[in-house]
Image (cartoon, helix red, strand yellow):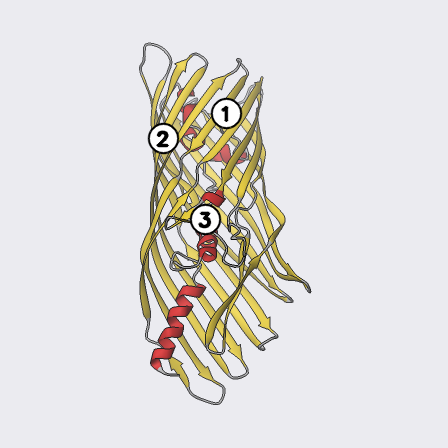
């Protein structure tokens, strides 16, 4: 194979295969990259809200109100310094026809570090707060094995990615009246991402190995505005608006492509480098919640809506080139979360439980990437959610000497995607996740 032909194939491989911001011309892969990078439906952190299923829009009264509803900061009457850690375990099983591959991974990171301080006022409350919060994770390990009978050939796709999305939040909460509080926060996004992607391909005549190493940096900005209403002494209603998030990815990728023929001979391309400079705009979101307290029991429920079809990639809507009607790759979601907290009588111990229903935002999946006739190709098709994303949560917390609190939250859940054709299921992807969050706070 001549060198200039190999370089052309290499450039096509970089453009076609990458489900990261490299793929400037491919709206489908741009949408898939957002899911891989973990920036859709950022989960937040904090043991108490985690254990209550994230139903915290009306229930929040601590530093985590910065994440869920900054108006909840006005409920704080004492200063607070808080720190937490997050451990996440994932298991991803990809089944392509009759071939199955399972990959497990586990990552531990700083969940948050935050502080809030109530300022003295003549009436009402004014609370300033700052925090660094883990908003999401790009940690992902996935392997797909496929036998392509039409060629015939085998292909293995490997994808390994690491990175944690942090948000630097500056906010305040203030009482407008004895029953109404208002809050706002400025959010700065930050992340460093490392990605390894590889294709091992073999047919009767040749084998090829394509690898891509990408290093990126995420920067972004958004803001939150919240409202908290004390309907009665036992009932609170919360509302939160999240602005569009303006995100920029910059970095560099290096691609390598080698191969050989069964009868002898082979090729090796020179490493191909490319710079990354891409922009995404995530749409605004809305949340509403209700919290009811009856003695030692608190019940909370939240609804959140975001129309991800309005996401923009380099100033354009993310649409599907495969559909004549230009269907959007991303869709609108309506999340539902419920939680409960019970305090033991005569003991500073609280038990929590919750449930979160968080539908998938992406309607297209990259099935398998391979190389045929010395040309890189990818199968991309619509999928349906056989099992939507759901999480069951629980936790416990306690107070020591009225100033130190320790909380533990656990979330267990997962989802399943299926791509089907006339012959039945082609690709099934099952994910199961377990999150453990430990938080501690000192109040003064």
Using the rendered view, name the quadrant where residue 395 is placed: top right
Give the residue at the far right of this rendering. 423
The label shown at residue 100 is none
Please tell me which residue is depicted at 49% across the width and 47% down the height of the picture: 88
- Give the residue at mark 1: 58
Question: Would you place residue 109 above or below residue 339 in this image?
Answer: below
The label shown at residue 185 is 2
- Residue 189 location (% of width, % of height): 35, 42
Whole-angstrom CA distance, mark 3 to mark 2, is 22 Å
| The C terminus sits in image quarter | top left
In the drawing, does residue 274 fall left or right of residue 434?
A: left
- Which mark is first along the chain, 1 or 2? 1
Number of other residues with Cα within 10 Å of mark 2, as a class: few under 14, some 14 to 19, many 20 or more:
many
Give the residue at the far front of this rendering. 324
Between 269 and 143, the one lying in front of the other is 269
- Residue 305 location (% of width, % of height): 52, 36
In the drawing, does residue 129 fall left or right of residue 332?
A: left
- Give the residue at mark 3: 38
Question: Would you place residue 331 above or below residue 149 in this image?
Answer: above
- Residue 386 location (% of width, % of height): 64, 51
- Which mark is first along the chain, 1 or 3? 3
Question: Would you place residue 372 above or below residue 104 in this image?
Answer: below
Q: Are marks 2 and 1 in contact (CB under 8 Å)?
A: no
Please tell me which residue is depicted at 37% across the width and 48% down the height of the picture: 315
Whole-angstrom CA distance, mark 2 to mark 1, is 16 Å
Check disc 3 and report its element: helix, strand or loop: loop
Between 38 and 77, the one lying in front of the other is 38
Check disc 1 and report its element: helix, strand or loop: loop
Give the residue at the far bottom of this rendering. 263
């Amino acid at each position: 194979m001549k060198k200039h032909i190999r370089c052309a194939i290499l450039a096509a491989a970089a453009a076609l295969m990458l489900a990261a911001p490299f793929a400037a011309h491919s709206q489908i892969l741009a949408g898939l990259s957002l899911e891989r990078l973990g920036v859709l439906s950022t989960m937040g952190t904090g043991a108490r809200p985690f254990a209550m299923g994230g139903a915290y829009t009306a229930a929040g009264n601590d530093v985590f109100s910065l994440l869920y509803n900054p108006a909840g900061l006005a409920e704080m009457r004492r200063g607070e310094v808080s720190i937490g850690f997050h451990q996440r375990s994932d298991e991803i099983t990809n089944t392509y026809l009759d071939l199955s591959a399972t990959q497990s991974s586990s990552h531990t990171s700083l969940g948050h570090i935050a502080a809030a301080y109530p300022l003295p006022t003549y009436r009402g409350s004014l609370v300033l707060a700052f925090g660094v919060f883990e908003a999401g994770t790009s940690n992902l390990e996935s392997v797909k094995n496929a036998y392509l009978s039409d060629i015939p050939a085998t292909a293995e796709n490997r994808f390994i990615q690491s990175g944690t999305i942090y948000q630097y939040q500056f906010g305040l909460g203030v009482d407008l009246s004895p029953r109404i509080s208002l809050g706002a926060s400025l959010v700065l996004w930050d992340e460093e991402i490392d990605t390894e992607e590889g294709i091992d391909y073999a047919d009767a005549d040749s084998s090829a190995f394509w690898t891509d190493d990408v290093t990126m940096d995420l920067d972004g900005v958004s803001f939150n505005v919240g409202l908290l209403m004390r309907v009665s002494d036992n009932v609170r209603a919360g509302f939160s608006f999240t602005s569009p998030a303006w995100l920029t990815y910059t970095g560099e990728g290096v691609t390598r492509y080698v191969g050989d023929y069964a009868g002898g001979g082979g090729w090796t391309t020179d490493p191909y480098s490319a710079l990354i400079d891409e922009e995404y705009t995530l749409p605004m979101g809305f949340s509403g919640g209700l919290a009811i307290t009856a003695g030692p029991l608190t019940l909370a429920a939240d609804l959140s809506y975001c129309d991800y079809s309005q996401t923009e990639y380099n100033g354009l809507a993310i649409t599907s080139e495969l559909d004549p009607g230009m269907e959007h790759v991303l869709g609108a979601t309506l999340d539902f979360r419920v939680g409960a907290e019970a305090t033991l009588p005569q003991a500073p111990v609280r038990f929590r439980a919750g449930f979160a229903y968080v539908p998938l935002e992406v309607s297209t999946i990259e099935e398998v990437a391979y190389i045929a006739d010395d040309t890189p190709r990818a199968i991309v098709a619509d999928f349906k959610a056989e099992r939507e994303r759901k999480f069951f949560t629980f936790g416990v917390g306690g107070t020591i000497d009225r100033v130190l609190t320790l909380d533990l939250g656990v979330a267990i859940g997962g989802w399943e995607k299926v791509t089907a054709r006339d012959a039945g299921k082609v690709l099934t992807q099952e994910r199961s996740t377990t999150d453990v969050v430990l938080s501690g706070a000192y109040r003064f």
